[in-house]
Amino acid sequence: MALNPFFLNGSISEQNLVQQLINEQLKIFGVEVSYLPQKFVRKETILREISASKFDDAFSIEAYVSNYDGYTGSGDILSKFGMNLKDELTLIISKEHFENFISSFLIDMDPDEIIVSSRPREGDLIYFPLGKRLFEIKFVEHEQPFYQLGKTYVYELKCELFEYADNIGGWDNVNTTVDEIDETLENQGYITTLKMFSTGTKATAQTSLRSGYVRKINIINDGYNYSTVPVVAISSAPSGGINAEAVAITSCIGNFCSVREILLVNPGAGYTVEPTVSIIGSTGTGAVAKAVIEKTYSGIGSITISNNGFGYVSSPSIGFSSPTVGSAVTAKAKTFVNSQGLVNKILISDAGIGYTEAPTISISNPPLLVGINTYFFNEVVTGQTSGAKSRVKNWDEVAKQLKVGIVDGEFLPGEIIVGSISSARYSLHKYEIPDLYDKYEQNDEIQQESDLIIDFSEKNLFGNY
């Protein structure tokens, strides 16, 4: 049978009254939170999994904290990775206010970014100002209380503390322009620190001519087991001459280390016969080398660095002007760069033949001579050589230190890092491996302490073999 027509199970005016009373209660006893809708940037077509998203809008709305006596959930858990926070929060918001002040804006946005605009959606974020924390909506209950007077009036949001995931759709793409929210996240998550060069200076060097010099030293046998660099001893030049000096360069393949080459520090002068070359090491044996001298024509002497330059991250190329007489062999040398980006050593691999005057030396420029502009927070920066991309977390203009989140690819030392919005350009000196910036995360501390207890280089940690 039909319901009694003389009794209404809630008229529109009664429903509006209940909604207004609820709205007033929320404004009196609620907390003003920020609602951050999740916008899809990229989805996998097969499983429809969200691989990239962003949070760049924030809407204020009043919410009643249902669990008024504190966070629920598992609380603070001490795990093998340090403190793990499992706080949960239940909020109640007005359905009418959401539809009028949030949904009306979402419905005009790109439908590929906002799939559901009519109600709060799982995956959206809530910024809770009392704890200065972000919570992720895990479930939206829209039928409690259950149809009072034939209608529902609130949304109950069951939220969990948002975990900063290692993907471009997590903390890295939060840019709401609300300073309180953005600054909370600026130094959170996986961050790579890039140490940059803002200016560069070209290195310069000069040399002189020598006769009766050691032109080069050839390796006859590279030896083996040279775990430390051996000393190279060259027999003395005749009276009135200049003794030649050289250093050994070793290389290792696996556990096999040998002498790769011998470079001259000083080619010496006045030699009439080939000097003996001895390779003396505290470890290793078997390396044999032979000196080649030039008695007829002139070559270069030791190289003096007149300006170490600045901004080098790898050994720059070096060239010499050509000789003009005799068999005319152009000199060759190798440069070495220290951790400060300076050319601190130039060694000779071939002193050349046939120079009548000291050759000019040309050393290539550092990757960047002048850095420009200032990186912007959250803009995409790209390595011009590697193509690696990331987003800016912080730029320290004084220390020339750039912190970036979510590196897609691997930046290469020496390449130019360019900002997509600011057009800032600086050269990468070196970078630290990505680290999780979380005040409760203790992975590094646990790893360091465990290394003091167990030698992880052993194949069998708990046996005798």
Image: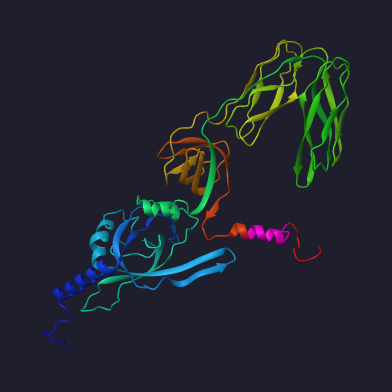
Q: Is residue 187 left or right of residue 337?
A: left
State whether residue 169 appears in this view.
no
Which of the image's four quarters has the C terminus? bottom right
What's the magenta bit mostly, secondary-structure-wise? helix
Q: Position of residue 373 (x, y in %)?
A: 43, 34
127 in relation to 336, above or below: below
Would you say 180 lies left or right of 453 here?
A: left
138 above or below 455? below
Q: Tell whether 2 sits left or right of 246.
A: left
Q: Is residue 294 above or below residue 441?
A: above
In the foreground, 253 or 418: 418
Residue 303: horizontal and vertical position, in percent? Answer: 71, 21
**Between 38 and 20, which is closer to the camera in this rendering?**
20
Q: Is residue 22 left or right of residue 337?
A: left
**Is 185 above or below relative to 130?**
above
- The x, y position of residue 12, in whole percent, is 15, 74
Q: Which residues are magenta?
A: 446-456
Residue drawn 45% across the image and 72% down it:
73
**Where does the image place residue 134, in percent across and percent down from the top left?**
41, 61
